[in-house]
Amino acid sequence: MKTRVLAGRHVGAVGLGCMSFGGMYGACEEETAYQCLARALELGVDHWDTANVYGMGVSERVMGTFLRQTNAEVAIATKASIVPKPERHFRNDADHLRSELEGSLERLGRSSVELFYIHRREQARPVEEVAETLAGFIEEGIIGAYGLSEVAPATLRRAAAVHPVAAVQSEYSLWTRQPELGLIQACAELGTTLVAFSPVGRGIFAETFPDPAGFHDGDFRKRNPRFTEPNYTANKAAIAAFRDWCHSKGWSVPAAAIAWTLDRGDHVLPIPGTRTAEHLDQLVAGAEIDFTDADRAEIDRMLPVGFAYGARYGDAQTVGVEQYC
């Protein structure tokens, strides 16, 4: 696979988001997850992204078991700072981050991880203080680099003034374009990788449209504005022409969606999430698609900026996400 730079090392141009291993989109059998991870290794997908809250440790434990069984060499990214109970809030203090990181390392069976993010910023705490804490973790050797998630360009610049920020994680896809309003540019300027999560639009750009009637109660999309009516029907209609066009080119829809994300800049690295090896094959195929100027123009015509019906998050889901436009 083609490679991109993340945290000072070359990794596959397409990474793997492991949130679904924790049951965020429905139950995931461990054996299915192991098959997906094994296929990732075969395909050159060697950057795996997880977090302490994905299944409250389940995703990390699944990954850790697989890594102990295989001794696979991969770049692991994990995150901390979301405290879900008793009332959801965020902590970026050194004691909390250290404690959560230690728990993640134990579940992963690692003495260190290549990349460690604050999952959400604690607004009352200066980000400069957080950058100093994470720089200290780097000096200790328990993380290789640090990143920020769902932050504004201004926050990135403030943190980078204290210590270089290896990565910023943000939702970015054909129907979520906010990073183009300053974040992509700031990342390029500062030498920071933009790690694009949900590049397949939480399944809207899969080969078949998701069926909201089948979403379980804990599924993020069940209360997401873009997947509820009347927005969902309108979104499917808007994307239908793009799906037909992808097939006319001999591409799967998810592969084209991944290719579009990769095409936005050499410093953009998508981390699509999946539970199955079959879906991973479709996603990784996007790294082999090269768009022409005519392709780009046609995509812009079919799916212009702002085409999506509904916000990317509902009111409850947007808490902790920094707004900058």
Image (cartoon, grey):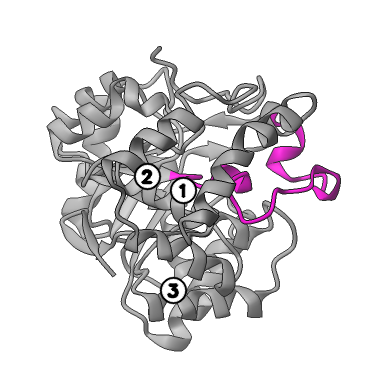
The residue at which mark 2 appears reads as 261
Per the image, label 3 sits on a secondary structure element best described as helix
The amino acid at mark 1 is Ala
Give neighbour class at mark 3: few <14, some 14-19, many 20+ (Cα, 10 Å).
many
Assess whether mark 2 and mark 1 are in contact (beta carbons under 8 angstroms): yes
Indicate the position of residue 268 as horizontal and vertical percent values: 29, 45
| Residue 125 point in image, percent of width and height | 37, 22
Do the CB atoms of the residues marked 3 and 1 lie less than 8 Å apart?
no
Task: Write down the residue under mark 3.
Answer: 40
Pick out the residue farthest to the right. 213
User: Picture quarter containing residue 288?
Assistant: bottom left
How far apart marks 1 and 2 lie (CA) works out to: 7 Å
Q: Is residue 117 visible?
A: yes
Mark number, residue 176: none
Residue situated in front as seen by the camera: 39 or 65? 39
165 relative to 251 in the view: left or right: left
For image coordinates 56% across by 80% down, the residue present is 35
Q: CA distance from mark 3 to mark 2?
A: 19 Å
The residue to which callout 1 is attached is 257
The amino acid type, in three-letter code, at marker 3 is: Ala
Q: Which residues are magenta?
A: 197-224
The kind of residue on which mark 2 rests is Thr
Residue 231: quadrant of the picture: top right
Q: Residue at x 29, y 27 (%)?
A: 183
Regarding mark 2 in the picture, which secondary structure is present there?
helix
Discs 3/1, front: 1
Label 1 crowd bin: few (<14), some (14–19), many (20+), radius 10 Å: many
Q: Earlier in the sequence, mark 3 or mark 2?
A: 3
